[in-house]
Amino acid sequence: MSHFSEDIHTPVAIVGAGACGLTAALALHRLGIDCVVLERDVVPAGSTALSSGFVPATGTRVQKAARVEDTAQLFAKDIQHKAHGQAAPALVKAYSEAIGPAMDALEQHHHIPWQLLDQFLYPGHSVHRMHAVPEKTGEGLMIRLRAAADAAGVVVLTQAQVLALNADDTGIVKSLTYSQPDGTEGRLLCDAVILACNGFGGNANMVRHHLPAMKDAQYAGHVGNDGSAIAWGLQLGAELADMGAYQGHGSWAIPQGSLISWALMMEGGVQVNLLGQRFHDETQGYSEAAVQVLQQPGGVAWNVFDNQLLQFAQDFPDFVVAQAAGALKSAANLESLAAIVGCPLMALDKTMTELNRLADSKANTASTPLEKQATKDPWGRTFKRRLEAPFHAIKVTGALFHTQGGLNINANCQVLKPNGITLPNLYAAGGAARGVSGAEVWGYLSGNGLLSAIAGGHIAAHAVAQKIMEKNT
């Protein structure tokens, strides 16, 4: 990683070296455009390293090799269905079309070895389209992206916290001011800027104002997500959009502070509160589950599952880490499980008996309204299988992972003013910009964060490159 102490010029300055920033930098490298990436941390990690690292994409080489029939149109439909039609149509179209080529380019040119996760469907997805690197972690993805950037000779200026965007009277950003490890400030002259520094989840005041349901929630994102991109954009007259949208997660292990894969819920696990009762349809989505869990007594719940699901979960590295840290509690029977949860045995027995009755029922083949009513879960869930002793449980709470609102952008990731006019040379992608989750927590489709990071970084780089090449001809 390089350091500069004097003013230098680069065609493109990228703020943030997470998945979004490095994807953009690698795309610019392929297009023959020089750039400098400014990263506040010693080692680039950001929100990507804290995520599961799973990326939904359609039309990729690995998806085609698995003979999964999928299209950008179907993906876009799934995104809008989850967002109740509230996601920005131009961005939904742009991201669903760009993510496949972006992923293939990372594989073909930078040796990112994608794998298709086809053991289960994440909530809201019609087909298997979730991709991951072999480590199946966000940290593993970041290690590989950093290695790709190093191999390509991408200049990443670490320990460089951007303090300001310096623009002229016409709104053209001429340079960035950043702090250096020795306390001095540096200046980077540039022709264009891509903001790839995520959102405002680490800014308590902004969370309180825009996301009141999460004001007391644990924050599981990167502390550097302080809303700087939004502040800089506003200073230049930018418009904000979807500020009430965010990714929560209803399965944040406490006190270990680690993510428990929602695949457990999708494959048959349940959540019970301190009263021993279920309280929602666990298969609706892990983002809105954060709010549901926080509304329970003590703001906590217990993930309950059995041996078959434990074996399934141990294929996820994050789960293995949480288990090693002591998150997993095991019970030979319901009495022991009730003691672990701290709930009345009678209530828990009623919950589990009803769950197993529903699993045994013919809910999907019931023909009369009376039959359907008798086999219907009050929360609307269809159960795949029974849960059998011995049981396992993990105490969780609802957490805020990252925000999905930010600077309004068009399909080329150009930052927009309220009148729809673009700022001359300012681009934003990933968490710095509005996402494709609409305006509420329930609009988040699994993987929307890394979708907007990688597709957005890819799009922004190509848009910037085209503008620079047009200017030079």
Image (cartoon, rainbow, N blue to C red):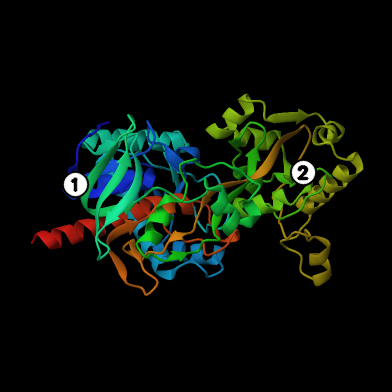
Q: Give the secondary structure at mark 1.
A: strand
Above-or-below relation of 173 to 184: below
Earlier-in-chain disc, 1 versus 2: 1
Q: Residues within 10 Å of mark 1 (few under 14, many from 20)?
A: some
Q: Residue furthest right?
A: 346
Locate residue 274, reporting x and y percent. Answer: 81, 42
**Quarter-wise, where is residue 314 in the image?**
top right
Q: Give the secondary structure at mark 2.
A: helix
Distance from label 1 to label 2 (Cα)?
52 Å
Picture residue at 73% right of the left edge, 35% below the top: 393
Locate residue 27, reporting x and y percent. Answer: 25, 49
The residue labelled by disc 1 is 10
Q: Amino acid at mark 1?
A: Thr
Above-or-below relation of 294 to 380: above
Q: Residue furthest left?
A: 473
Residue 298 disc label: 2
Locate residue 339, reporting x and y percent. Answer: 85, 32
Q: Residues within 10 Å of mark 2 (few under 14, many from 20)?
A: few
Q: Nearer the viewer, residue 225 or 154?
A: 225
Q: Is residue 404 left or right of residue 280?
A: left
Q: Amino acid at mark 2?
A: Gly
Q: Is residue 151 visible?
A: yes
Q: In the rendered view of the protein, which quadrant contains the C terminus?
A: bottom left
Q: Nearer the viewer, residue 6 or 52?
A: 6
Picture residue at 25% right of the left edge, 32% below the top: 3
Q: In the rendered view of the protein, which quadrant contains the N terminus?
A: top left
* Closer to viewer: mark 1 or mark 2: 1
Locate residue 425, reporting x and y percent. Answer: 26, 60
Q: Is residue 283 visible?
A: no
